[in-house]
Amino acid sequence: MNRNFRSDLPIYTQLVGQMEQDIASGAMPPGARLPSVRDLAAELGVNPNTVQRALQELERAGLIYTQRTSGRFVTEDTAAIARCKQALGESQIKEFLAAMTLLGYRRQDIIALLREEKEEES
């Protein structure tokens, strides 16, 4: 997991985002056991309360669950993971479009650039 935290966002929010990305991309597969709060906090160099808050947010979102004596696990609900992936993708597209608009591109210009890039990859 990324240890480079930005100063403009709370660390727990950044942890949630990083873990959502890991779950959506499959880096943390369905059913995977998460490290304990203390272990994760030590690995990331953050306060355990920060990790706990991030994990609570992920649990509320349905991306992880807790088994009383076994720990926390990534959900096996593939629909929840797909919804997370879709939301992350839409967010990335909106950010990209906003940045391109600031550069002065119109939508048709952006589409043309994307087509050119796709042809170059092929």
Image: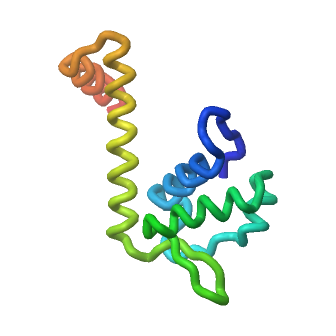
- Whether residue 2 is situated above or below residue 43 in the rendered picture: above
Say which quarter of the image contains residue 32: bottom right
Which residue lies at the image location 32% right of the left edge and 43% below the top edge?
90
From the image, which quarter does the C terminus lie in? top left
Corner quadrant of residue 62:
bottom left
Colouring of the image: rainbow
Q: Residue furthest bottom?
A: 69
Question: Is 91 in front, or is 121?
Answer: 91
Q: How many marks?
A: 0
Q: Spot the residue most to the top.
A: 104
Instruction: Pinpoint residue 78: horizontal percent, then vertical percent.
Output: 37, 71
Image position of 30 (left or right of 39): left
Q: Nearer the viewer, residue 7 or 92?
A: 7
Choose between 34 and 26: the one closer to the eye.
34
Q: Is residue 35 left or right of residue 16?
A: right
Q: Determine whether 82 is above or below 122 in the image.
A: below
Residue 58, percent across and down?
A: 51, 63
The residue lying at 36 percent from left, 15 percent from top is: 102
* Residue at image point 72% right, 68% down: 37
Q: Taking 114 as reference, is 61 left or right? A: right
Instruction: Find residue 8 and report its horizontal and vertical position in percent.
Output: 61, 33
Residue 103 location (% of width, % of height): 37, 12
Residue at horizontal 23 percent and vertical 24 percent from the top: 111
In the visual, does 52 lie left or right of 101?
Answer: right
21, above or below 102, in the image: below
Specify the farthest residue to the left. 108
Image: 50 above or below 73? above
